[in-house]
Image: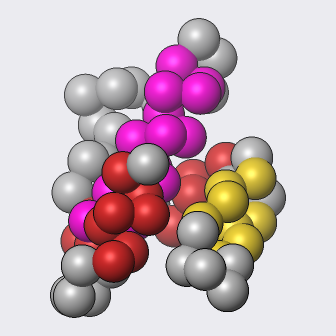
């Protein structure tokens, strides 16, 4: 899984966060949230944290570094 591979790489975690957000976007692509997709932010350093909190219930990082994102 791309999220797990990104976590195994050294760095600040922006790539893993980007994969998490892409997964959330794919899951809810059919849902109209009232946000214009042209305005939607795709860069990890431009995260709409309020939207992230509305979308992601919680994230579990296991002892084996596996990530489970609950929406």
Q: Position of residue 9 (x, y in %)?
A: 24, 79
Q: Residue furthest front?
A: 64
Residue 55 or 67: which is nearer the viewer? Answer: 67
Q: Quadrant of residue 31?
A: top right
Residue 61 in view in this figure: yes
Q: Quadrant of residue 15?
A: bottom left
The residue segment tinted magenta is 15-29
Magenta span: chief secondary structure = helix
Q: Residue furthest top?
A: 30
Q: Is residue 55 magenta?
A: no
Q: Is residue 50 above or below residue 20?
A: below
Q: Residue at x 52, y 19 (%)?
A: 29
Residue 54 in view in this figure: no
Q: Residue at x 55, y 40 (%)?
A: 24
Q: Residue at x 44, y 48 (%)?
A: 1
Q: How is the image coloured?
A: secondary structure
Q: Residue at x 37, y 75 (%)?
A: 7
Q: Is residue 47 left or right of residue 33?
A: left
In this rendering, the count of numbered labels is 0
Q: Is residue 17 magenta?
A: yes
Q: Is residue 28 left or right of residue 9?
A: right
Q: Position of residue 23 (x, y in %)?
A: 49, 40
Q: Is residue 7 left or right of residue 10?
A: right
Q: Is residue 43 left or right of residue 36?
A: left
Q: Position of residue 70 (x, y in %)?
A: 75, 53
Residue 69 or 47: which is nearer the viewer? Answer: 69
Q: Position of residue 22 (x, y in %)?
A: 40, 41
Q: Quadrant of residue 12?
A: bottom left
Q: Is residue 38 above or below residue 32?
A: below
């Amino acid at each position: 899984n791309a999220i797990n591979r990104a976590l195994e790489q050294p760095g600040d975690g922006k790539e893993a966060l980007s994969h998490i957000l892409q997964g959330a976007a794919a899951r809810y692509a059919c849902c109209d949230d009232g946000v214009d997709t042209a305005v939607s932010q795709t860069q990890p350093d431009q995260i709409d944290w309020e939207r992230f909190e509305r979308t992601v219930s919680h994230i579990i990082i296991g002892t084996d570094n596996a990530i489970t994102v609950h929406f």
